Image (cartoon, grey):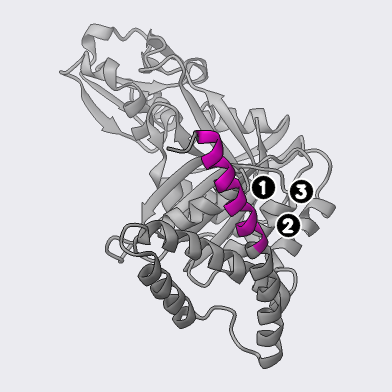
Amino acid sequence: MKDLAEIRREIDTIDAELVKLIRQRLSIVEQVAANKKERGAPVFDPAREREILAKVAREVGPEYENGACLLFSTLMSISRARQRIVVRGEPELVGEIKSAMATTANKFPTIAEVVCSGVEGSYAQQAVSQLFSYPTIKYVSGFEKVFDAVDRGEAPYGVLPVENSAAGTVTQVYDQMVKHDFRIVKSLRLKVNHVLLGVRGAKLAEIKAVKSHPQALAQCSKYLKAHPDWQATADINTAVAAKDLAASGRTDLAVIASRACAELYGLDILADNIQDESYNYTRFICISKKLEIYPVARKFSIMLSLPHRPGSLATILSKFAAIGVNITKLESRPIPGMDFEFRFIFDFDASPRDEQVLRLLAELADDPEIEHFTFLGAYAED
């Protein structure tokens, strides 16, 4: 039997030949692209690709079929991307990103008009106050109205929660993302400490019901399970629930909200820090209708939908792995009216000045097999 060092030398020799052949193939691909450009032919030729994969599968045999076809599928995907650059020039998306980087101010604004859901004392208001030093806040009822207000230009910025470290994704916000044209310009991780509030003079033993936003209820599930006789009811917002409780005067009702709401609405704190986890953070995004990319941007968000067939998502993930990009979040949401079809939201760490990342985005934006692609933004997270 050969020793490991000898076997590895053989692999190195084969790899060196593969590298030469890949370079040669990609060089010829550019000639193919020039020919297609002259003839006005499309870059993507699915019949040709099926023919190649079928030939590869026949020649390597069943034992190596899957791996070999994956390799050639990736190689052809890279080839298509190079062809598009030759045929179309720099993609529009890359131009938009570079233009935004050139025209955006050096620092995120400290003064701005901002819209968020809820009322004074809400966690969204606290997030706004951390993102902006001197905000003028417009409150609306519900996440959709935040998107609508930014869409209509009623405020240049909107702030929305997207996920919690304990309770997970705020699905209502992700579902609204597909309906609106916006860009993420910054994000923030806000420490959340929930308290149980009652009207002045209320006693914990008198409580029969509790209200709050569904996310807050989920984040305090252990505390609520310890009080099985309480009726838990969802409300539109934690601070709205607190404000309504103060107006009602009910001594049998409590709300889960922030400590700030106690002072704001004249309520008593019946229990403190009732969230399930001490490490309880909610991530908020700041959205704008205008694409703004600040020099400190190090995070990207994109949204896309893929054909419903094996390997579609794996092919996309391999593109990120190939250039060493770390995907920090991958969220899937069902597409309404389409059985078993999903839209994917990716968050990943990268610099918008990285040419490899820009080429990847251009490739994804122009890939005909990606049914819908949306660039959501490049931004910094505090």
195 and 138: which is toward the camera: 195
In the rendered image, which residue does mark 3 sit on?
353
- Residue at 68% x, 39% y: name it: 298
Q: Is residue 94 left or right of residue 10?
A: right
Q: Position of residue 361 (x, y in %)?
A: 63, 58
Q: CA distance from mark 3 to mark 1?
A: 10 Å
Q: Is residue 342 above or below residue 200?
A: below
- Give me the residue at 70% from left, 53% from top: 356
Q: Sequence order check: which comes first, mark 3 or mark 1? A: 3
Counting residues from the N terminus, which is met first, the one under dot 1 or under dot 2? 2
The residues colored magenta run 4-20
Which amino acid, by three-letter code, is at mark 3?
Arg
Q: Which secondary structure lies at badge 3?
A: loop
* Amino acid type, mark 1: Ala
Of the image marks 3 and 2, the number of the one nearer the N terminus: 2
Q: Quadrant of residue 269?
A: top left
* Separation of marks 1 and 2 at Cα, in angstroms: 9 Å
| Residue carrying label 2 | 97
Residue 142 visible here: no
Label 2 near label 3: C-beta < 8 Å? no
From the top left corner, tell me how far across and down residue 228 is, in percent: 17, 18
